[in-house]
Image (tube, rainbow, N blue to C red):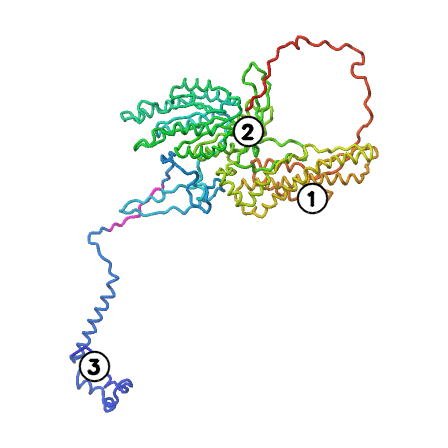
Amino acid sequence: MSDLSLFQTVKHKLFRHSGSPTAEHEDASVTRPYETTDASEIWEDESFWDADETVAMVGSMLVHLIVILSLALVQLQNPVDEEAVVMIAPPPEYEETVDLIEEIVVSDQPQVEIGADALAEFDMAEASAATFAEIANMVSPVDLEPTDLGDIMVNKMFSQPVAPQDRLTDQKGRVGKGTAGASGAVDQITFEVMQAAEERPTLIVWLFDQSGSLTRQRQDIRDRFDRIYEELGMLREQLDSKTAGEDPQDGDQARVLTSIIGFGEKVQLFTEEPTADLETIKQTVAEIPVDNSGTERVFTAIESAAKQYNSLRRNNGPRGPKRNVMFVVVTDERGDDAHLLESSISSCRKWGIPVYVIGVPAPFGREHTLVKYVDPDPEYDQTPQWAQVDQGPETFLPERVQLSFTGNFEQEPVIDSGFGPYGLTRLCYETGGIYFTVHPNRNVSREVRRGEIDAFTADLRAFFDPSAMARYRPDYLSPQDYVKAVKRSPLRQALISAAQIKNVNGIQRPQTRFVKRSEAGLAQALTTAQQDAAKLEPVLVQLSATLEQGLKDREEEESLRWLAGYDLAYGRVLAQKVRTETYNAILAKAKRGMPFEKEKNNTWVLVPADEITVGSKWQREADTAREFLQRVASEHEGTPWAMLAKKELEVPIGWKWTETFTDLSPPRQGGGNNGNNNNRPPRDDEKRMIKRAPKRPVPKL
């Protein structure tokens, strides 16, 4: 009997005896005759559990139930590895280690393109000073459990960043490393040479500026060679002991070789072959002739040196190039062949040659500075003379508005920018070298007096802490990328445009004292003074209008350098504009007549004052000027911008009249101190006959 027929038979019997409505509805003809039947008769008639159909049904249900449960439990059953070993132990403790960078190695692969290998939203590599992040812009280190397949050292792939991630690719050479003398720079370069020589044999190429102003510095470096090559000799002995028994890569050549190149109007190679003889090196440097042409072709010399020694940088089998090559430039100017800067960078980067420059600090925002010149020949007059030298600016384009007029009439001092001239500094930056700003009178705690300036040194009156200036590094970009960055920012474009406006000479010393001999004479004197101010007003109005175009973008600017430069320029321009225009206005007001408070007085004197009495418009501009200048002084402490802002704030912006008396009596004729008609003392003819050393004119430096 099938399961279905069995189930129907049992169902029929149950419902037939139950008297339930369901059974009645299903088969009324069957249920109605048994409505009064007693239940006991059913069990007496046939036992339900003794029937074969019941046993078969229950068995079938159990079988189906077992099958269904078995299928359901198949996914919950885990495979059992009979060979597995279960160990119960606390988790292992891992000691966190930090790998310190012991060495920086320059890639042996030639770099053809200039710039950082970065894909960003701009088609260039920005080298502007980034805002250093207090918290690293990087995901947290990943903790991984050890595995039999190997240890994945994820945490060792990263080092703690000191700036936002998108700026790390720009960190190349070092710039603005200030020293008080060339010897300090030479010691640092000696360390760099030792690092390179530990990797492979090294060639140092010294490129000396042949101008007369470098005579003493060349002597200082020559005298330092003893220590340099003594230390390098000790290194050579250590390396030779380590590599004893090995085949030397360079045969019998010395570990460190030296070449000497001079440059001025021409480039000269003074060592036909690189040498390791210290006496030969010192004698060669001592005999470098002076070039009085006033031309320094420094980038031509660098390109020539790269062409001369690039064969040493070609791959020489599995060990890489035959030698490391380093260029050390000694100069006190920016160079007269800046058009070769980009090709010089390309050549040095292509062959992996770092460039180190022992140079001078660039004057802040200026192209020229004065150098104290003393004739190097003691047979001639040793009186100091001042010669103009091209040592700046520190940026590709001038980023500072030139204003000379201040209320106290003092000439603005020439100060240190904190960095070297743009071209040579960018060359060091792009090639992985260092630019050393050497000035023997460097003092960051006070201003330097002119009498303290050493011979052959620039007249810089103030210096700044390199740690404070690090965040104000110039943009060491190519000319094309620099211009693109400026054009993208209205603030930067406004500042550069204002800095291009020339002939802002200002009122060097405006007339402030007016003696009243007559009404007409006073009016004429006031009118003449107004004319000087009237010449300057249009230029200041143009500067103010140009800088105002950058106000809308000020909040978007992130560079501290550009913010400081813009705020200082706008504050100073407004202050100068108000001083000039109120000077003109107060003179015009005086021409209408002013009575003296004291009848005796006959002279009007104009003095700086905080109050402005000639118009509320100028008062609002004066308040804006103070706001910008105070912001620079407080937010950029310890920088050239803050120093100039403070000097501007020391001088009141407005004017006021004071009165005094001037004696107009004519001076007495004759008289003098020789009333007794005594004879004059005889002149010392012997003293007049003393032979003085001849004086030569300052050569072009």
Question: Could you tell me which quadrant the C terminus lies in?
Answer: top right
Q: What are the residue bounds of the magenta stretch?
A: 86-96
Q: Nearer the viewer, mark 3 or mark 1?
A: 1
Say if 146 sits above or below 283 in the image: below
* Residue wearing tag 3: 10
Which residue was labeled with disc 1? 618
Q: Is residue 536 above or below residue 21?
A: above
Corner quadrant of residue 458: top right
Q: Is residue 104 above or below residue 66?
A: above
Q: Secondary structure at mark 3?
A: helix
Q: Earlier in the sequence, mark 3 or mark 2?
A: 3
Which of the marked residues, 3 or 1, is nearer the chain's N terminus? 3
Q: Which residue is mark 2?
A: 390
Q: Secondary structure at mark 2?
A: strand
Give the quadrant of the N terminus.
bottom left
Marks 1/2: CA distance?
39 Å
Q: Position of residue 582 (x, y in %)?
A: 71, 40
Q: Which mark is residue 643?
A: none
Q: Give the residue type that dot 1 points to.
A: Trp
Is there CB contact under 8 Å for labels 1 and 2?
no
> Of helix, strand and loop, which one carries label 1?
helix
> Whole-Å distance between the Cαs marked 3 and 1?
113 Å
| Tag count | 3
